[in-house]
Image (spheres, grey):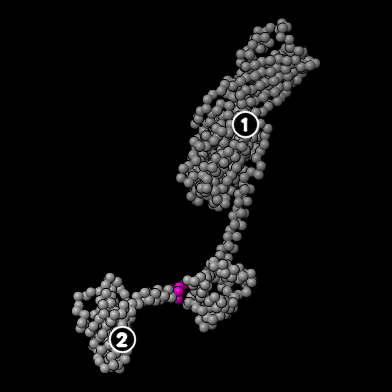
Amino acid sequence: MLSADPSVILQDDGSLKKVNPSFTRTFRNTGLKVSGTPLTMFFSGEQGRDFEIKLKMARHKKISFSHEAQFISSDDEICWIQWSFVSHKWKKLFYGSGRDITLLKQQEEQLRVSYTAMESAANGIYLLDKNEVITWVNSSFLKISGFTRTGIVGKTPENLSSGVHGESFFNDMRETLSQGMVWIGEVVNRRPDGSLYTVEQTIAPVYSPLGELSYFVAIMQDISERKKAEKVLQEHLFLLQRDIDLAAKVQASLLPAALPQMEGFDISALAIPAQYVSGDLYDCFLQDDNKWFFAMADISGKGVPAAMLASSVKTLLRSGSMPYENPSLFLNEINGKLYNQLNNAEMFVTLCAVKFDPDDASLIYANAGHTQGIVIRGYENKIELLPPTGIPLGIMKEALYSETRTSLVPGDAFVLYSDGITEAHNEQWELFGMERLIEILKQTLLMNAEERIKLIVEAVSDFRKETALSDDISLVVFCAEPRMVQFSFVADILNLEKMNSIIRNSCSAYGQEFSYAIELSASELFTNIILHSHKDSEGIIRAKLTLAPDKVELDIYDSAVLYEADKPQDRTENLLNEGGHGLNIIRQLCDELTHSAIEPEGNHWHVVKRRKNESLTIAG
């Protein structure tokens, strides 16, 4: 009774006769008098009935017995105790000794739960000893592999081999496991009926507390159907990608293969789709009348539907009445042709159409709901915004469009863009916006068209960082560069108006007052040369206009007798046609007038008219 474990002496009816101190410490104080109390009063759960049956049998046969019972400890914990009882040879008593098996029962429960989980797992699980012999498999393994339990336990995984993998595959697997690492990969196995299946398998080595390899646990998931689906998906993706590539090529063919080139003007364009194909479209070509035609369209939506509609727009751009005399009438015409198609598709198109005449640098602009056109006045440091002149195409069948007129001086540029630029956003969902675009354009005053586009695209890319494009991007930049206009006529007063017309057209972009000063100066020189220097002889008058951002230079060459400023000039009633007074008028109208001789005979007149500068403003 001095044992550290609880000990009791029981009457043959199961009541306590005597207990040791350990019993009192082990069991919760119930307030019962121990002597005469049935031992089952200290049990919890349903173990009391089983104990009474065992006790009755042991009393009848005078044998020993054991019993496991759950109890509440003095710390109010649920515990387990294993009792061993020995009957007295001649007295109706039983000597009992208890052992706390709570930890053992907890371990058994953990093992039971683990086994149940492994057995009922959807993934196939099997155990291998350190010699790679299969010692246990769960039901899912049998279902996946097609083996019976007796047909695979005691065998090696070679019985699962399909022959698909080479020896190096399994050597790499063993090498990974020998280093104490987990191996993960896909394995093609073979069932007993010969059918193949693919599993995603994980194999992990398990070590004893002493660090010795005990066994391997392998978990496999049947991915055969997934692999089949992946194969089908890859085939479909291949076909889809082929169609998308074809669509992209078709759409790329909608864009001009090469932009027209003309001395004194520079053009560049770029299209970046937000997806594989774009709903943006631009075009630029020279019409039969040698005038430029620009167009940029943005079809609502993105992807293939928008790209298909872009094809219809491109067809109309190139098949309409040419040359387009009025962009506004062109928009009226194309809206009527597209309305039904757009209305049925519940889509619309924004379209900007521009006609540019290189002779007088005039630009006629009509805009059906597209983003604002931008005119950069290089020398004046001024940016003009040209707003839409009508609603998008496809909104109203009878929509009418107006147009705006302006001109480009050398150093000026015209920019068409899609809202994919201004609506590009960063990770904080801030829009790039019009103000940022204008700030970038201010930095491009000395750049050519391609450099301007590159700077804009880089600025948008830097702004949005890793954020995907939310819309297609299109850009067309058209620059007027410094250029020369050269012409010659027979020195005949009948050709005066032809000469004046060329000068008037070439200088009209600088403004009416500026242009008139150059025209009047040229007219005075032409008249004097024709009426005085060539009044008794035939000759050719050659002229050159040099158009620059800040000035216009007029050079006139003739083959007449050398003009001598000190020689008395013939006087007439018309002062504009009189040499001395006419030259004074030219000096008042322009900033410079010089004369130089041409050897062996002839004259060179050089006239310069400069522009006034202004501070940066934003108009429109």
Residue 572: x %, y % from top left: 67, 8
Q: Earlier in the sequence, mark 1 or mark 2?
A: 2
Residue 425: x %, y % from top left: 49, 44
**Could you tell whether 174 is left or right of 570 in the image?**
left
Q: CA distance from mark 1 to mark 2?
A: 113 Å
**Could you tell whether 484 is left or right of 312 in the image?**
right
Residue 85 on the magenta span: no
466 versus 122 height, above or below: above
Task: Tell me which segment is drawn in magenta.
Answer: 117-123
| Res. 620 mark | none
Which residue carries the number 1 mark? 480
Residue type, numbered disc 1: Ala
Quadrant of the image containing the N terminus: bottom left
311 versus 587 height, above or below: below
Work out whether residue 169 or residue 518 is closer to the camera in this orientation and state it: 169
Asked whether the beta carbons under mark 1 and mark 2 sit within 8 Å of each other, the answer is no
Which residue carries the number 2 mark? 85
Could you say whether the residue bearing mark 1 is in a helix, strand or loop?
strand
When asked about the image quadrant of residue 175, the answer is bottom right
The local crowd at label 1, few if under 14, some if 14 to 19, many if 20 or more residues have their Cα within 10 Å, is many
